[in-house]
Image (cartoon, grey):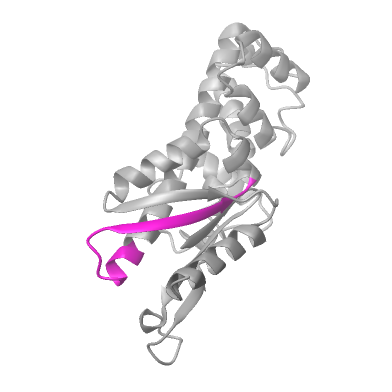
Amino acid sequence: MEQAELWTGSNTCYMEEAKNTETVEGDEGLMCVNMEWGAFGDNGCLDDVRTEYDNAVDDLSLNQGKQRYEKMISGMYLGEIVRNVVIDFTRRGFLFRGQISETLKTRSIFETKFLSQIESDRLALLQVRAILQQLGLDSTCDDSIIVKEVCGVVSKRAAQLCGAGMAAVVDKIRENRGLDHLEITVGVDGTLYKLHPHFSKVMHKTVKELAPKCDVTFLLSEDGSGKGAALITAVACRLRESGQ
């Protein structure tokens, strides 16, 4: 069993057999491992996939150089990544007639909720344009198309990166248990996972592609924090181990 949290931040924990945990004495029982996976990449291992826009977000963050993986996948940062891409495209003359508005210069003005709204399959370009106008951006239909595409790319990358991390965890669990095939349930919490129109589907697809020997069932927690998902995961695991 595993638990993941995807909203303003991101984290994962899972149940590991004690024999595979160096800090635990003895080989009996299970240990809940809090991965703090948001810090993945702080040693530079993600530098090859980070972009100038990721660096711009990181440079102005309160914890510069820290939580780099989290800054690429969590709801707290995706809107800011999009804003930096839009600013760059505007400077190059691809958007808004090359004119950068004062609103666009405001940090965090492009909230992640706008990504979910703009990427909605039900939203026409005129509605996308209306959202941009709320942000003080006088956009054309072409501008709206480009911004929608940018939102889609940033969100898809985040979902794929999150799915890649999840796939690595479940496949590691499978290997540690010496199984040819693993069936596992992952409790997931967070507004990004719940409200974004495509995030969960892309993440699920990525996990399936990268961990083909694992049959993963995703269980949504509705309590608005990671506590519910973690509790569901821990209790279900204990019941399974005890044969109940």
Q: Is residue 1 left or right of residue 214?
A: right
Residue 170 locus on image (x, y percent): 37, 59
Instruction: Answer left or right for 89 relative to 16.
Output: right
In the current view of this chain or complex, which residue is farthest to the front?
244
Q: Is residue 188 magenta?
A: yes
Q: Residue 104's x, y, as percent?
A: 71, 28
The answer to whether any part of residue 92 appears in the image is: no
**Residue at 62%, 43% in the rendered image:** 75
Q: Indicate whether 171 appears above or below 74.
A: below
Which of the 4 quarters of the picture holds residue 102? top right
Instruction: Check residue 77 for magenta coloring.
Output: no
Q: Is residue 138 visible?
A: yes
List x then y, in percent, for residue 90: 59, 21
Number of residue marks:
0
Asked whether 122 or 80 is in front, the reply is 122
Query: Residue at horizontal 47%, vertical 41%?
Result: 159
Which residue is at 51% across, 28% downward? 152
Residue for point 66% across, 62% down = 227
Location of residue 203 with respect to 182 vertically, above or below: above
State the residue lying farthest toward the bottom. 25
Say which quarter of the image contains residue 78. Answer: top right
Q: Point out residue 21 in the picture as x, y percentages from the top left corner.
A: 41, 81
Which one is nearer the viewer's eye here, 165 or 145? 165
Numbered range of the magenta stretch: 172-190
